[in-house]
Amino acid sequence: MIYTQEQIKRYLERIQYDGPLTVSMETLNGLIYAHQCQIPFENLDVFDFRKEIDLDPQSLFRKLVENRRGGYCFETNGLFYGMITSLGFDAYPCLCRVMFGVEDPGDHEIDHRATIVKMDGKKYFCEAGIGAAMPPEALEVAENKWQEMKGFVYCTRTIEEGWYGTVRKTRSGGEKTELLFSLLPVHEIDFVRISYALSHSADSKFCRMRVVNRRTPRGYCDLTDDVFTEEADGKKTVVKLSRDEIPGILKEKFHLDISEPLRPL
């Protein structure tokens, strides 16, 4: 067990989850959705505060649970993986490639982590935080099996040998491959160098721009540099913020109470 019963209790309070805790699809789906809605994807430590990212499970607990911060994928999905395995789920971390704006997998390096859960002879792809569109529940790894979840429709599909895509049906009736994942089990140490590169390289998106994103029951909220976007019930609002307005938006819309000065853009 990675986390103690007391830490699990505090995590559940943090994500405002009061549902069942049995090893079941109901529990897994409830935890994924609650985590996405309460713990934002954010790179403030990398972009604004120039702090090192520590992937140790206890460091993740202190930052995301005790200090009520968010984090980028290696942090949010790292915490999620530790919590569900501590609850008894049979799971392992997996490597991913985010495919937003990319057509050829060979044009984009491995830059993401998620979780594979094994249950009742099946495998499920679980995403707790990517800072963009993501399945709101566990997605069964089954070739072209479309699955409806909270108003979204997803399937998994083989993209190339050893790599599967999460494919979403768009509002216009098309399809969009959002990321690729491998079913090959990996270890926590495999993410250390990837995370270091993404948090230090001048070529990394996370070093070049501020990214904050949170799922909401009605849509999502996003802050990219100083542009705030909120979608609720299909209606989108976009506002350019002054530097002084950003901390208030972070607190109101992302539940982030930031006292340190933000980096000038």
Image (spheres, rainbow, N blue to C red):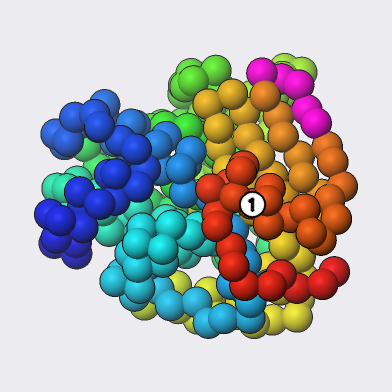
Between 105 and 223, the residue placed more toward the observer is 223
Asked if 53 appears above or below 113 in the picture, the reply is below
Report whether residue 99 is seen: no
Where does the C terminus fall, quadrant-wise? bottom right
The total number of labels drawn is 1
- Which residue matches tag 1? 250
Give the residues drawn in magenta, as a range: 233-237
Where does the N terminus fall, quadrant-wise? bottom left
Report whether residue 111 is seen: yes
Mark 1 residue type: Leu
Q: Is residue 34 magenta?
A: no
Q: Residue at x 57, y 81 (%)?
A: 51
Asked if 252 appears above or below 50 in the picture, the reply is above
Asked if residue 77 lies left or right of residue 179, the reply is: left
Between 40 and 55, the residue placed more toward the observer is 40
Asked if 39 appears above or below 157 in the picture, the reply is below
Q: Residue at x 50, y 57 (%)?
A: 70
Image location of residue 242, percent across then percent down: 85, 55
Image location of residue 128, percent across then percent down: 44, 47
Task: Count residues near mark 1 (Cα–Cα under 10 Å), then give few for <14, some for 14-19, many for 20+.
Answer: some
Q: Residue at x 62, y 28 (%)?
A: 219
Asked if residue 85 lies left or right of residue 241, the reply is: left
Image location of residue 47, percent across then percent down: 68, 72
Image location of residue 111, percent across then percent down: 58, 64
Between 178 and 255, the residue placed more toward the observer is 255
Q: Main secondary structure of the magenta part?
A: strand
Q: Residue at x 63, y 81 (%)?
A: 50
- Label 1 SS: helix
